[in-house]
């Protein structure tokens, strides 16, 4: 821009610079020059010093205050010759050069060309650096978008991958679901659409005993904004009740307050917990029954031993009649047998549990085994006046573990005596095809149908412990022994007409 109050000078300049690579803007006053500076950016300003109103120096000062003119090179045009002070003032207000009138056109042209070139170069650099910055920003934005998308995908995969859990969000006030992870459908059986369209229905699927707890947990989450954890039950579409461990938090979003929850299906864990509790309870019950059962024969045994000791210490043992002593020893031996039987049962259970119970098979006669056992029980049968009827047509040989089969017959006969109410017992042995069938039947108290399966399990009993002694292990061990032989045991019973246990054994079980 050229600024001069003498229009003739401006016209001369325009003519001189008409073939230049830049455009010349003219102004005839400081004020007009300032107006142009506000509108355009100039490569250089040729400023006449001596002008009315605003002179060149004042105009230069004001140009510097305008953003567009802050760094524009200013060349002063002056007729005043080389005065030091004058030149200094020019530099103070931002002059880069002086040109003296009358103007040497070729010098002026050369100088302006330099400024124009500088301006172009600066603009070019600015343009490229702006472009580079823009490209950089676009690159960065793209990378951020990619990372965000990746994160979103990972987050989605993570949420959708939770197979045993439901991730959800819902409006904190209306409790309307806004998001539910897809596995909700597989876990609870209600279609995802129903969660979103009929949220009230899903909330109504909370077990009625847990609704108060859920309401209060949601209230706490809303009021505190902290994580709230609780366990609740929900009813699956097929009516099954599932346990969930739920964590809920309330967050502020642009859609208002939002509840965010994670419900993990812990039904199996709960079941395990319940069965563990039951097992612990069973163990405690067993310990108390076992100590009672062991104590029962021990007390009379202790009394008998103490009585013999007393007689011995008093030197009166010789005077006790032989029959009395024999009676004493007989009852002591009976008590010891009961103890041995109980301890054997416990040992067998531990062998079965650890898989260490094995058979020693031989060729043995089941008929003889049954007869021997009945003989062993003869004293007890006589003392209780219980009749045993044997129906054994003849020997029945098979490949079995003799002492373990004895144990089977003993357990069944022992039970028939214990629960048989003193009525006759029938034992049958017969061969059916390649199987041996043993039956022990009584006319005693019988077993209710509901109990007939579980009595073969460990510690299971179907009688009150105060009425009948026992650990609830005999039938469990019997079943294990029969099954180890490849056979099976069943029961037929009616609470009014006694009980029949049937054992079927393969005759040629592998040795
Ligand atoms: P225990 O006799 O020590 O209780 P068992 O395992 O031998 O243990 O028997 C389990 C339960 O089966 C008994 O407690 C009883 O309720 C029932 N039971 C077994 N045999 C008979 C039977 N012959 N008559 C009626 N109930 C029986």
Image (spheres, grey):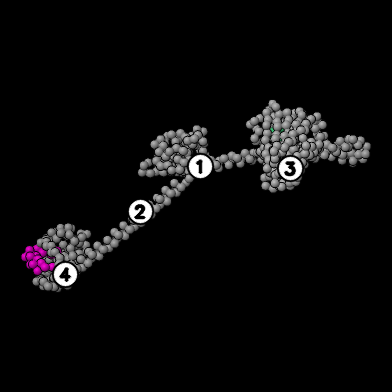
* Count of numbered labels shown in the rendering: 4
Mark 2 Cα shell of 10 Å, populated few (<14), some (14-19), many (≥20)? few
Disc marking residue 15 = none
Pointer 1 and pointer 3: residues touching (CB < 8 Å)?
Answer: no
Disc marking residue 398 = 3
Task: Residue at 72% x, 34% y: name it.
Answer: 439
Residue 444 x/y as whole percent: 72, 29
Q: What residue range appears in magenta?
A: 1-20
> Disc 3 or 4, which lies upstream in sequence?
4
Q: Which residue is mark 1?
A: 265
Mark 1 Cα shell of 10 Å, populated few (<14), some (14-19), many (≥20)? many
Closer to the camera, 340 or 431? 431
Q: Which residue is mark 4?
A: 113
Q: Is residue 323 magenta?
A: no
| Quadrant in the rendering for residue 372 | top right
Disc marking residue 145 = 2
């Amino acid at each position: 821009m050229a600024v001069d109050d003498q229009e003739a000078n401006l016209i001369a300049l325009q003519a001189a610079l008409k073939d230049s690579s830049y455009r010349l803007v003219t102004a005839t006053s400081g004020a007009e020059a300032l107006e142009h500076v506000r509108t355009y950016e100039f490569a250089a300003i040729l400023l006449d010093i001596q002008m009315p109103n605003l002179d060149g120096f004042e105009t230069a000062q004001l140009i510097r205050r305008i953003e567009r003119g802050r760094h524009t090179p200013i060349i002063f045009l002056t007729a005043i010759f080389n005065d030091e002070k004058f030149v200094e003032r020019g530099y103070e207000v931002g002059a880069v050069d002086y040109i003296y009138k009358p103007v040497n056109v070729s010098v002026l042209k050369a100088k302006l060309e330099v400024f124009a070139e500088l301006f172009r170069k600066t603009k070019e650099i600015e343009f490229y650096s702006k472009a580079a910055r823009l490209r950089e920003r676009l690159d960065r934005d793209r990378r951020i978008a990619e990372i965000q998308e990746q994160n979103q995908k990972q987050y989605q995969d993570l949420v959708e991958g939770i197979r045993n859990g439901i991730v959800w969000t819902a409006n904190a006030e209306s409790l309307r679901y806004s998001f539910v992870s897809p596995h909700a459908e597989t876990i609870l059986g209600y279609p995802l659409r129903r969660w979103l369209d009929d949220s009230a229905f899903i909330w109504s699927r909370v077990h009625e005993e847990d609704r108060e707890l859920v309401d209060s947990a949601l209230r706490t989450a809303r009021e505190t904004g902290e994580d709230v954890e609780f366990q609740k039950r929900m009813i699956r579409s097929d009516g099954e009740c599932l346990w969930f461990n739920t964590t809920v938090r309330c967050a502020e979003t642009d859609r208002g307050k939002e509840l965010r929850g994670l419900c993990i299906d812990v039904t199996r864990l709960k079941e395990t917990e319940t069965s563990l509790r039951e097992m612990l309870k069973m163990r405690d019950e067993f310990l108390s029954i076992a100590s009672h059962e062991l104590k029962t024969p021990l007390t009379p045994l202790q009394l008998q031993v103490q009585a013999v000791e007393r007689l011995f210490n008093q030197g009166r043992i010789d005077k006790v009649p032989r029959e009395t002593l024999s009676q004493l020893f007989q009852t002591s031996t009976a008590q010891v047998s009961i103890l041995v039987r109980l301890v054997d049962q416990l040992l067998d259970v531990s062998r079965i549990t650890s898989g260490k119970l094995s058979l020693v098979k031989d060729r043995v006669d089941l008929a003889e085994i049954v007869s021997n056992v009945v003989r062993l029980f003869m004293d007890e049968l006589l003392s209780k006046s219980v009749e045993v009827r044997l129906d054994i047509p003849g020997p029945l040989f098979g490949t079995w573990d003799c002492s373990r089969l004895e144990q089977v017959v003993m357990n069944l006969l022992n039970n028939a005596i214990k629960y048989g109410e003193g009525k006759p017992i029938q034992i049958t042995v017969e061969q059916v095809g390649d199987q041996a069938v043993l039956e022990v039947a009584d006319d005693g108290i019988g077993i209710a149908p509901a109990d007939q399966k579980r009595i073969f399990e460990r510690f299971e009993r179907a009688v009150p412990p105060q009425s009948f002694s026992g650990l609830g292990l005999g039938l469990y061990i019997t079943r294990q022994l029969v099954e180890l032989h490849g056979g099976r045991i069943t029961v037929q019973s009616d609470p009014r007409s006694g009980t029949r246990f049937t054992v079927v054994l393969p005759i040629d079980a592998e040795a």
